[in-house]
Image (tube, grey):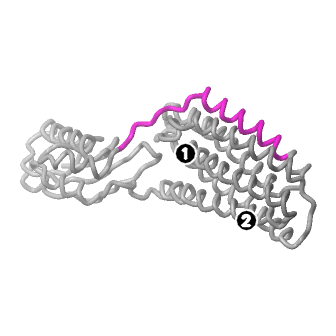
Amino acid sequence: MDYGKQTGALGNIPNRHEMHAKHTHASIERLSPRRLLVASALNVGFAIAELAGGLLSNSLALISDSVHNFADTSSLAMAFVANRIGLKQRTSKYTFGYHRLEILTALCNAVVLLVVYLFIFIEAFKRIHSHTHIDSRMMLTIAGLGIGVKLAAMLILRRPSRGSLNVRAAYLHLLADIFSSLTVICGGLAIQLWHLTWIDPLITFGAGTYIVLRTCPILLESLRILMEASPRGIDIQPIIEWVEQCDKIEAVRETHLWQISEQDVYFAARLTLHNIHSLEQAQAQLEEIETGIKRYFGIQHAFLSIDTGTSGA
C-alpha cells in the first residue's frame, strides 16, 4: 500500500533551544514601496550629477562611482519589481510561485556590476601613466555631497535589507560607495595639494576592488540558492535522525533539503511506517511529524510520501 501527503513533524522532540541556536529563520519584512522609491530617487539623482561632474572634472574615480550608483538604483528598482511579482499567487504553470525571481535579479545585478567594473579597471590601467588634468575642487564637492546622499539612502533601507537579498545587495553597495567617496575626497586633496593625477586611477582600482569583493558573496549566494543547495544553518542529517526516532518510523529514504528563495525552505522524504492499520492513522502520524519539522528545524514546507512496512495493514 502506498499513499502520500504534503506534511511535516513531531515525536521524540530534540532540545528546542539547541535547534533554535542552529538555525533561526527570520520572517521577511515585505518591502515598502515608499522606502524604495525615496532611496531610488536619491540614488538616481545623485548618480546623474556625479556622472556629469566626473565628465566635467575628468575624474575616472567619480565616473566609476556614478556607474556604481546607477547599479544601486537598478538593484533597488529590480528588488521592488521582483518583490511585488513574488507576492503573486502561484499558478498551474508556476506551481512554486514567483519567489525565485528576486534571486535571479540579484544574480543579474551582481554579474552586470562585475562586468562594468572590468571595463573601468581597463580604463584606469590606461590612465595610470598619463597626466590628465583633473578638477580637484569639483571632485571634493561632489564626493562630499555623495556621502550625505548615501547615508540617507542607507538609513532608509536599513530595515528592509534584513529580509531581501536584492535590498541587502543595494545596502552593501551604498556602504561601499561611502568608502569610495571618502577615498575620492582624499584623492582630490592629494591632486589639489601635490598635483598627483595618478591618484585618480589608483583610487578607482582600490574602490573597485573593494566593491567587487563585496559583490562576489551576493553572486555566490544567488547561485547557491538557484542550485538548490541546502540552506545555510540547516543540516539535513539531524532532521533525518530525528524523524527516524519518531513513533512508527521504520525507515527514512530519498531525503532532500533545499530553498527556492531566502525565506522558503523545503524538505522532502520518503518514509516507511510499520504497525499502521488505517490511512487515518498514517495521516495523523504525518501531521505530528510536520509540526515538529516546522517548529524545531525552521522549515516551512515538508513533502513526505509514505509506505507501510511489512507489518502494516
Span shown in magenta: 25-51
Q: Secondary structure at mark 2?
A: helix
Three-letter amino acid code of the residue under disc 2 = Phe
Task: Please report the residue visible at 14 percent of the width from the left and 51 percent of the height from the top.
Answer: 273
In the image, 124: left or right of 217? Answer: right
Q: Please state the horizontal and vertical placement of residue 250, each as a whole percent of the image.
A: 13, 56
Q: How many marks?
A: 2
Instruction: From the viewer's side, name the closer residue of 121 and 184.
Output: 184
Name the residue furthest front: 193
Number of the label disc, if any, that sits on residue 205: 2
Q: Earlier in the sequence, mark 2 or mark 1?
A: 1
Residue on which the image places disc 1: 168
Dot 2 alpha-carbon crowd within 10 angstroms: few under 14, some 14 to 19, many 20 or more:
many
Dot 1 alpha-carbon crowd within 10 angstroms: few under 14, some 14 to 19, many 20 or more:
many
Residue 233 visible in the snapshot: yes
Identify whether 66 is placed above or below 235: above
Task: Please report the residue visible at 22 percent of the width from the left and 49 percent of the height from the top.
Answer: 306
Identify whether 188 is placed above or below 130: above
Labelled pair 2, 1 in contact (Cβ < 8 Å): no
Identify whether 99 is placed above or below 238: above
Q: Please state the horizontal and vertical placement of residue 30, each as a whole percent of the image.
A: 50, 32
Residue 101 visible in the snapshot: no
Q: Quadrant of residue 205?
A: bottom right
Number of the label disc, if any, that sits on residue 63: none
Task: Please report the residue visible at 14 percent of the width from the left and 46 percent of the height from the top.
Answer: 13
Q: Which of pointers 2 and 1 indicates the residue nearer the eye? A: 2
Three-letter amino acid code of the residue under disc 1 = Arg
Q: Please state the horizontal and vertical placement of residue 45, each as a whole percent of the image.
A: 77, 36
Instruction: From the viewer's side, name the closer residue of 160 and 87.
Output: 160
Find the distance from the CA under tag 2 to the CA under tag 1: 24 Å
In the image, 99: left or right of 301? Answer: right
